[in-house]
Amino acid sequence: KNLCLLQLNLFALYLRNDHYLLSMFQRSAGTNFSTNQRIACFFMYLCTIVVSTAVFYGVETKILQDIVASFLISLFGKLPIRLIQWMFTKSKPKLIPRSKRYTTIEHKKYDKIIRKEKDRRNSQKGKLKQLVTTTTTGT
């Protein structure tokens, strides 16, 4: 029973992350694949399916040719999307330099306070080193 429940939860997790339409509304946290990227991939998937279906539109085919055409439509619709999805998920998030991270006045004030505290600690360390060197050399 626990194994079946675990499998069901794992399936739900994969469905939430890998299904293009469902993943726009319910996705798990911690993925590099944003909602905007998911929407773009879904739209691209629809466009590639429409274009690849248009290639076979109006062509008289037999049953075996219909199966081959369906397979090719699925392949042409899925491969480019999987490639782009792989590129999105493997990309690293953009790092923002610390100097550009804070733009509000409050954050700048906070940075000034931190800088003053660091300077105060460094000056205390310098005074302590001078005291230690004078006491050791004075004896």
Image (cartoon, rainbow, N blue to C red):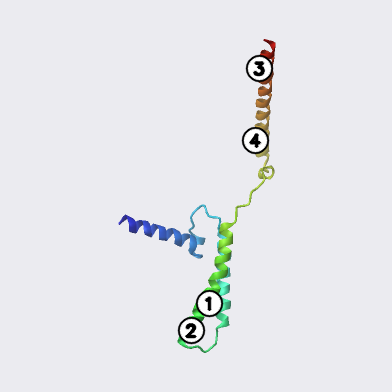
Say which quadrant the C terminus sits in.
Answer: top right
Q: Is mark 2 on a helix, strand or loop?
A: helix
The dot on residue 110 is 4
Q: Name the residue under label 2.
A: 66
Q: Which mark is residue 55?
A: none
Can you tell which mark lies on residue 73? 1
> What's under tag 4, amino acid-wise?
Tyr
Residue 13 vertical position relative to residue 63 in the rendered view, above or below: above
Marks 1/3: CA–CA distance: 80 Å
Give the amino acid type for the residue marked by disc 1 in the picture: Ile
Residue at the outermost left position: 1
From the viewer's perspective, tell me whether residue 69 is left or right of residue 7: right
- Which numbered mark, 1 or 3, is in the foreground of this view? 3
Q: Is residue 115 placed above or below 6 in the rendered structure?
A: above
Frontmost residue, 103 versus 97: 97
Q: Looking at the image, tell me whether mark 4 or mark 2 is earlier in sequence order.
A: 2
Q: Where is residue 25 in the image (x, y as percent from the top left)?
A: 50, 60
Q: Sequence order check: which comes first, mark 3 or mark 4?
A: 4
- Where disc 1 sits, the SS reads helix
Residue for point 55% across, 70% down = 79
For mark 3, give the secondary structure.
helix
- Residue at 66 percent across and 44 percent down: it is 101
The disc, 1 or 3, on the residue closer to the chain's N-terminal end is 1
Amino acid type for the residue under numbered disc 3: Val
Mark carried by residue 132: 3
Query: Residue 71, position in %: x, y?
Result: 50, 77
In this picture, residue 5 sits left or right of residue 80: left
Q: How crowded is mark 1: few (under 14 residues within 10 Å), some or many (20 or more)?
A: many
